[in-house]
Image (cartoon, grey):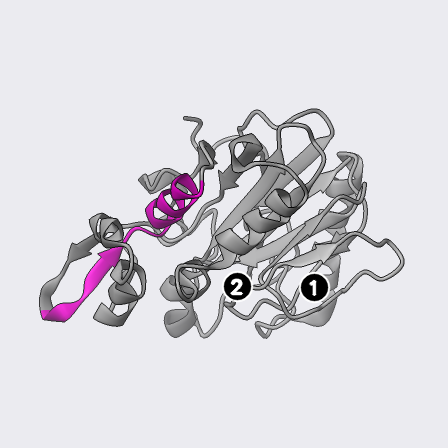
Amino acid sequence: MPDPRKGSAWLEPDWPAPKGVGALFTRRLGGVSQPPWDSLNLGAHVGDQPADVACNRATLQAEVRRRGGGDLLFLNQVHGTDILAVDRADSLPQGAEADGASTTLRRLALVMMVADCLPVLFCDTGGRRVAAAHAGWRGLAGRGGRGVLESALSGFVQAGIPASQVLAWLGPCIGPEAFEVGEEVRLAFVDGDTQAATHFSPLAGGKWLAHLSGLARHRLARLGVSGLYGNDGTKPWCTHGNPDLFFSHRRDAARLGSTGRMAASIWLA
């Protein structure tokens, strides 16, 4: 598997997406923001200078357009499970409250911002629909076994595209050696799915280390998605452990006061 720490300024998903599907993930490099948001911070809600964020977003917009994409669609992410179906070009829900989006529109670039949470990009093998999801532990666990990944996949299934024809790429997130959680997090996954327990390692004091990308792969496989690519939980994919390349809320917020946001984006060219 390719090392996500190497390559150009943009991390390009290594997956067999069909022609016409474009995608990328931003590292923290190549922007104008000053510390602690240095340098390609795309988050407008983390205390960075608005003009710097606007410049960084323009840099991302230009790169997406160069690759055949169009306007960027940013959402107000709330660690929930809602996925917006965006299939009308005349009513784009810029800033709508949701943790993912799905579309059949050409050149609309869906954007998920992260700084430890897991971004997941979806497409089908026929290149008919794309989706993007923001999966922190709350959104991933969801309620009653339905989380943000289940919501994202349902858009394909409702359109007549079976899970077996869906591909998913998992981007960088906090790794299994750094994501310390309490018992309530483990129970949110294990209740109703005992196999999820294999993605938690015990620590002293009733704490656990959680394997976020492992939990996501487990959920997607149970849903019938066999085309899984990207983050395998190894150190190169860990946002917390690679400070030169990735923002990390857990690593930086308490120590530096804030941190920036990266973005995963996908579109139909």
Q: Secondary structure at mark 1?
A: helix
Q: x%, y% of residue 199?
A: 25, 49
Residue 264 in sight in this render: no
Circle 2: residue type: Thr
Crowd around label 1: few <14 · some 14–19 · many ≥20 (10 Å) = many
Q: Give how far apart the Cα atoms at labels 1 and 2 are.
A: 30 Å
User: Is the Cβ of the residue at disc 1 closer than 8 Å to that at disc 2?
Assistant: no
* Residue appearing at x 52%, y 63% in the figure: 81
Residue 57 in sight in this render: yes
Residue 190 versus residue 53: which sits nearer the camera?
A: 190
* Residue appearing at x 69%, y 35% in the figure: 22
Is the residue 149 above or below the residue 78 in the image?
Answer: above
For label 1, the residue is 52
Seen from this angle, which residue lies furthest left? 204
For label 2, the residue is 81
Give the magenta-colored segment's residue range.
205-223
Seen from this angle, which residue lies furthest right? 90
Residue 140 versus residue 241: which sits nearer the camera?
A: 140
